[in-house]
Image (spheres, rainbow, N blue to C red):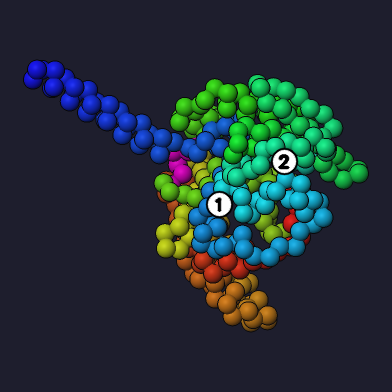
């Protein structure tokens, strides 16, 4: 009797231990929407729930384009209200002058969607439909009259949607294959497996890989018209965490310590230049609240060398994020 009780107790403890280990491992694993992404040159992930709670950007009035409003009316999906998380795979295009430009995208979205209304809407605008792995893939032509490209959209479940604007169906098929395989917490693309360990814990937004690709200009990274001394294929790991303020961290991974030292020196020179330009603009066109927020951002920015990495850290004032979230240019679907 005592032996049976002891064995039962040991079995229960073992099961509880296994459950705890499984929960810890899953907590440390990449988000599922990121694990579903196909092979790519870069990955960008955003958990929008903390940002929505902190800034209430979903309550800000938005000037929507007619096409965007038509999408909302037909599907009932209001992205700024209903989207909870999103992951994007960035694919370098062989022909940067093609319809996709230098970068193509594959995406997985998680949130609250009316699947039936979305399917009806896609059926009315689709130019083609394919069934793969038990899911309907709708192909929609997007772009202008001069150049259009296919956008393939599929519903993975009641709360998950996948899309890809790549020329072939390979990427959307890969997403559906990963979803069908009920991927383990540590599955995913080779890039995710290699670099996700570098993402700081509790990051609500992060990006890794060649994330300069969308800003590439003649082989280099350009931001707001300023060409940075970084090749477009530079590997980065960037993250945003809310630690009282929003903490930004960007790591540039270089081939060796000497390259990291050179990058650190160059970026610090650019930071000094940026501070000078900001001060001059504040004197010419003063905006007290915005100027104070930008000054707090630049004053907190540090660029340091950590072995083979140049690491930028900064604190982004929540007030600045709220101002940016309240800026409402015409939205596009």
Front in this rendered view, residue 74 or 234: 74
Magenta range is: 195-200
Residue 137, given in percent of the width and then of the height, sits at 73, 29
Examine the structure image and report whether residue 222 is included in the region drawn in magenta. no
Q: Quadrant of residue 12?
A: top left
Front in this rendered view, residue 222 or 205: 205
Front in this rendered view, residue 67 or 304: 67
Most extreme residue toward the left, as rendered? 2
Q: Quadrant of residue 138?
A: top right
Residue 189, given in percent of the width and then of the height, sits at 55, 30
Q: Establish if 72 lies above or below 275.
A: above
Q: CA distance from mark 2 to mark 1?
A: 23 Å
Residue 168, given in percent of the width and then of the height, sits at 76, 27
- Whether residue 45 is visible, yes or no, is yes
Q: Residue at x 50, y 50 (%)?
A: 204
Q: Residue at x 43, y 48 (%)?
A: 202
- Whether residue 87 is visible, yes or no, is no
Q: Residue at x 47, y 27 (%)?
A: 184
Tell me whether circle 2 and circle 1 mark residues in contact (CB < 8 Å).
no
Q: Residue at x 64, y 43 (%)?
A: 113
Q: Is residue 26 left or right of residue 168?
A: left
Q: Quadrant of the N terminus?
A: top left
Nearer the camera: disc 2 or disc 1:
2
Residue with the mark numbered 1: 48
Residue 52, given in percent of the width and then of the height, sits at 55, 58
Residue with the mark numbered 2: 117
């Amino acid at each position: 009797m005592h032996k049976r009780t002891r064995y039962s107790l040991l079995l229960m403890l073992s099961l509880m231990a296994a459950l705890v280990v499984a929960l810890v491992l899953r907590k440390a694993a990449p988000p599922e929407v990121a694990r579903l992404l196909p092979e790519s040159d870069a990955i960008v992930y955003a958990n929008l729930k903390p940002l929505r709670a902190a800034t209430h950007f979903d309550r800000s009035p938005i000037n929507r384009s007619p096409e965007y409003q038509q999408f909302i009316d037909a599907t009932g999906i209001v992205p700024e209200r209903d989207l909870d998380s999103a992951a994007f795979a960035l694919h370098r295009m062989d022909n940067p002058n093609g319809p996709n430009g230098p970068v193509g995208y594959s995406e997985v979205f998680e949130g609250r969607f009316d699947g039936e209304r979305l399917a009806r809407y896609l059926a009315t605008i689709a130019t083609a439909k394919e069934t793969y792995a038990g899911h309907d893939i709708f192909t929609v032509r997007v772009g202008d009259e001069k150049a259009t490209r296919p956008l393939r959209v599929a519903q993975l479940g009641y709360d998950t949607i996948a899309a890809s604007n790549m020329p072939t169906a390979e990427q959307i098929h890969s997403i559906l294959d990963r979803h069908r395989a009920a991927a383990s917490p540590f599955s995913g693309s080779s890039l995710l497996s290699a670099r996700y360990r570098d993402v700081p814990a509790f990051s609500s937004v992060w990006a890794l890989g060649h994330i300069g690709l969308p800003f590439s200009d003649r082989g280099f990274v350009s931001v707001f018209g300023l060409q940075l001394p970084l090749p477009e294929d530079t590997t980065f790991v960037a993250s945003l965490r809310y630690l009282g303020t929003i903490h930004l961290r960007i790591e540039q991974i270089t081939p060796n310590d000497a390259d990291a030292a050179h990058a650190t020196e160059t970026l610090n020179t650019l930071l000094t230049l940026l501070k000078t330009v900001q001060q001059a603009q504040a004197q010419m066109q003063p905006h007290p609240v915005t100027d104070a927020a930008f000054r707090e951002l630049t004053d907190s920015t540090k660029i340091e060398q950590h072995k083979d990495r140049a690491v930028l850290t900064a604190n982004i004032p929540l007030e600045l994020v709220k101002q940016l979230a309240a800026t409402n240019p015409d939205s596009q679907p």
